[in-house]
Image (cartoon, helix red, strand yellow):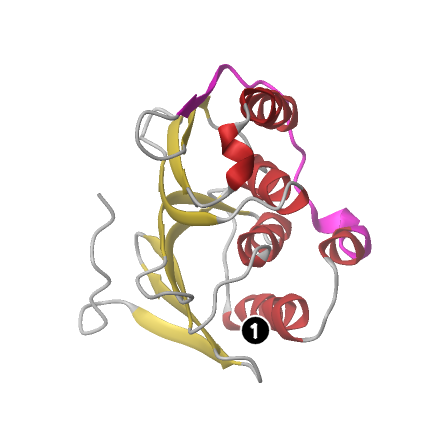
Amino acid sequence: MLPVLDKTASWKSLHTVRGAEPIRLSFFSDRAGYRLRIESERNEVGVLFRLCAVLFVHGFSVVEGRIQSPRDLGIEDEFYLQLTDPSAILDERKASVMMKDFESLLFRGVSVLEYLIANQKKIPARTRKWKGTVELNFDEKPLLIVSGSDQPGLLLSLSQAFFLMDIDILEAVIHTDRMGVVRNQFLINPSDSRFGNAEFRKRLVEEIATLV
């Protein structure tokens, strides 16, 4: 379970970004790691993809996360982060650059592809050592479960698949334990009529498995 962010404790608010769109992005630091929170009155496919691209370029991994749409079209997402390189240090200047990158992708129309190409030298090496499973549970609502060993860029790959296939994620719980084992659960919008098609469900699982 992702702990509630206590702003009165030792968490230090580093930056807050408010764009022309009704989006508020806040970044906090603590001895144990970092937190990123995004709040918006409107939900749209692709926000998670853009967030993950910036985190990947700046060497962050998502240890825990909570994605939810508490209102009809709004979002309240929060991520607990750690630097992939334990010897790396995020100073004020680097944090500022990262927040400007978030602004570029969220508010200024910069595409993820343009951003990744421009920052190719910063991208950490990705080793494809995935050992795990991708499962779509359709008992009540479409629940996609990804379990297995963690690797850099895993959440970026998943969010890319959701973006390319126009999958609307209503809620998600992202968790990586101390042994590096991932269990991510994504609740997909049940109003998507495509999930009534067995072939589409099969193709979705195959596509996700290929990307991760």
Q: Label 1: state its secondary structure.
A: helix
Q: Position of residue 73 (x, y in %)?
A: 42, 66
Residue 10 as seen in the image, left or right of residue 41: left
Q: Residue at x 36, y 74 (%)?
A: 13
Q: Position of residue 195 (x, y in %)?
A: 51, 32
Residue 8, quarter of picture: bottom left
Q: Residue at x 45, y 45 (%)?
A: 191
Q: Which residue is mark 1?
A: 96
Residue 146, quarter of picture: top left
Q: Is residue 198 above or below residue 110?
A: above
Q: Residue at x 45, y 78 (%)?
A: 16
Q: Observer-nearest residue: 202 or 209?
A: 202
Residue 158, quarter of picture: top right
Mark 1 residue crowding within 10 angstroms, few (<14) / some (14–19) / many (20+): some
Does the magenta portion include 131? yes
Q: Position of residue 127 (x, y in %)?
A: 64, 25
Residue 12 as seen in the image, left or right of residue 86: left
Magenta segment boundaries in residue numbering? 117-137
**Badge 1 amino acid:** Ser
Q: Quadrant of the N terminus?
A: top left
- Number of numbered callouts drawn: 1
Q: Quadrant of the C terminus?
A: top right
Q: Position of residue 57 (x, y in %)?
A: 64, 51
Q: Is residue 60 above or below residue 43?
A: above
